[in-house]
């Protein structure tokens, strides 16, 4: 981009960025640094990843947490985007000479499946049951085994955080059905309505007002439904 154009755009957008950051800082802690990374990787925009990774590490967020956030995105956005992001993450880690601690897993190998049942029941099985040639059986099986059991069993993130970060990726993708389901799941996992809404507001510079306004309405509606 021409330097003059970049300077003009930076000047035009800076007050907007500052306003979002300063208000979100009153409501969010570590997520303020993690959310931009989720937005970038979900959209496949890798240029900002090294700076975002540096910001996360400078905020004293463990590198194991950073990696777990990215690993968990793979079943949501696909493995290729995550692999591209990890290449850039690894460069920062090598530059800073970061040593990773091993990640422990839950003793119960079906821990993730039990979490899924508690938060979502048999929703996906029921939704896909009429698909031909066992497709309606395989997809729910793969979701349970290769999302919930493969990832939720790892102790680097708790269920509450996993649900929140997954929801933010889905909002970035603007997938209506999943946003509604995972807004409810995130609330049931212990996230407050306020925390979820301010997390979405932190996405504003990366996904824009339409996606944010639609999503915070869904979160609010689900929160009200759970109170009834």
Image (tube, rainbow, N blue to C red):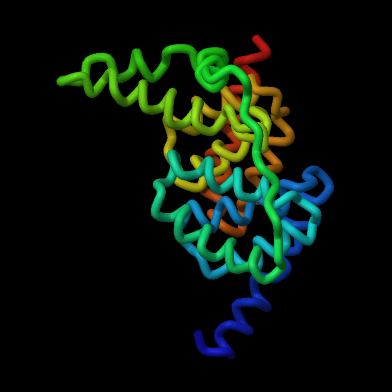
Total marks placed: 0
State whether residue 88 is above or below residue 186.
Answer: below
Out of 21 and 48, give the one closest to the viewer. Answer: 48
Determine the image quadrant of residue 114. top right
Q: Residue at x 21, y 19 (%)?
A: 134
In-front residue for pair 226/169: 169
* Residue 88 coordinates in the image, percent (x, y): 55, 65
Say which residue appears at 62% left-offset and 20% top-offset: 107
Question: Left or right of 163: which side holds 128?
Answer: left
- Answer left or right for 206 relative to 15: left
Q: Which image quadrant is residue 22 in?
A: bottom right
On the image, the x and y values in percent for residue 221 come to 59, 24
> Eyeballing the image, is 26 above or below 166?
below
Q: Position of residue 113 (x, y in %)?
A: 50, 18
Residue 116 in view here = no
Q: Residue at x 75, y 63 (%)?
A: 18
Name the image quarter holding the C terminus: top right
As drawn, the residue found furthest toward the right would be 26
Residue 15 in view, yes or no = yes
Residue at x-position 53% and y-position 45%: 71
Q: Position of residue 28 (x, y in %)?
A: 78, 44
In the current view of this chain or complex, which residue is farthest to the top?
Answer: 228
């Amino acid at each position: 981009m021409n330097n003059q154009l970049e300077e003009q755009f930076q000047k035009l957008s800076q007050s907007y960025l500052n306003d979002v950051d300063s208000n979100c800082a009153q409501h969010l802690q570590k997520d303020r640094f993690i959310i931009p990374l989720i937005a970038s990787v979900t959209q496949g925009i890798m240029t900002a990843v090294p700076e975002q990774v540096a910001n996360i590490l400078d905020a004293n967020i463990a590198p194991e947490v950073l990696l777990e956030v990215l690993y968990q995105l793979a079943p949501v956005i696909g493995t290729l985007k995550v692999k591209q992001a990890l290449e850039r993450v690894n460069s920062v880690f090598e530059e800073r000479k970061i040593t990773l601690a091993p990640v422990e897993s839950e003793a119960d190998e079906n821990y993730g499946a039990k979490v899924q049942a508690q938060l979502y029941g048999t929703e996906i099985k029921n939704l896909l049951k009429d698909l031909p040639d066992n497709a309606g059986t395989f997809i729910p099986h793969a979701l349970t085994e290769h999302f919930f059991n493969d990832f939720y069993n790892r102790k680097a993130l708790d269920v509450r955080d996993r649900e929140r970060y997954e929801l933010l990726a889905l909002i970035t993708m603007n997938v209506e059905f999943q946003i509604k389901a995972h807004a409810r799941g995130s609330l049931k996992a212990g996230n407050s309505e306020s925390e979820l809404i301010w997390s979405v507001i932190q996405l504003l510079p990366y996904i824009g007002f339409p996606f944010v306004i639609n999503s915070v309405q869904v979160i609010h509606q689900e929160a009200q439904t759970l109170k009834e």
